[in-house]
Amino acid sequence: GENVEQHPSTLSVQEGDSAVIKCTYSDSASNYFPWYKQELGKRPQLIIDIRSNVGEKKDQRIAVTLNKTAKHFSLHITETQPEDSAVYFCAARGAGSARQLTFGSGTQLTVLP
Amino acid sequence: DGGITQSPKYLFRKEGQNVTLSCEQNLNHDAMYWYRQDPGQGLRLIYYSQIVNDFQKGDIAEGYSVSREKKESFPLTVTSAQKNPTAFYLCASSLGLEETQYFGPGTRLLVL
């Protein structure tokens, strides 16, 4: 089945700096890659997603890039703010009979004021 | 997100006891899912259902059971066969298997 690895597990940045979180996946047939933000004790919430026919997608301060050849995708947050502090999860969805989402292990992002 | 509810928020299980976690959605979604989240780990899929009266095992189904008798409801039973049930349980739903998943607020299960 699909295997998703996420790095780093923890990330601290100064307010206003950029943050980058990277994920790799194993199934070359995977075609959908969402990113979720989870605040402590709360539900994961979708912040951005990308499909395999697109290389990059941007939404205000958040962007996701996808490299299908290398089988990796990244989350970029610019001009970070303290409220960006949370755990971020990447995920990949396979194709055909394996259409479930497989999640990475998460990145704890801390934005220091 | 507000269309998916889970209850209770906290649940305590005694040794040898079966407990049932509730998940309800009013989004008219066909697909529903149960995930388990342990500290420092990602979400792992327990069971999912593509449509009413149908469900499939996920990666860690042992010790769990589900039913899907109504489109709106997908309860999860944690049986006594699940030896390490302490975790945060998240329910999700989507229009279809290939659509965006939205999560409920979660149930934290603790063993007494």
Image (cartoon, coloured by chain):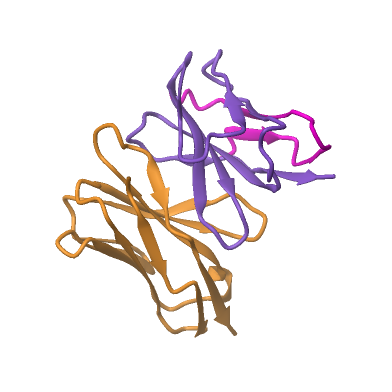
Which quarter of the image is occupied by the N terminus of chain B?
Answer: top right
- Specify whether B9 is left or right of B69: right
Identify the residue at image location x=52%, y=73%. Answer: A109
- Chain B's colour is purple
Q: Where in the figure is residue A6, as x and y percent of width and height?
A: 40, 65
Write down the region rendered in magenta: B1-30
Question: Which quadrant of the figure has residue A98?
Answer: top left
Q: Is residue B106 magenta?
A: no
- Does B74 appear above or below B81? above
Which of the pair A19/A82 is nearer the observer?
A19
- Chain A's colour is orange
Q: Is residue B27 magenta?
A: yes
- Does A69 appear above or below B85? below
Q: Where in the figure is residue B49, as x and y percent of width and height?
A: 46, 25
- Does A83 appear above or below B110? below
Which of the pair A17/B75 is nearer the observer?
B75
- Specify whether B14 is left or right of A12: right
Q: Where in the figure is residue A37, as x and y percent of width and height?
A: 50, 58
Asked if one can make out residue A19 in the rendered structure from this viewpoint, the answer is yes
Which quarter of the image is occupied by the C terminus of chain B?
Answer: top right
- Does B69 appear above or below A92? above
Q: Where in the figure is residue B77, as x and y percent of width and height?
A: 66, 28
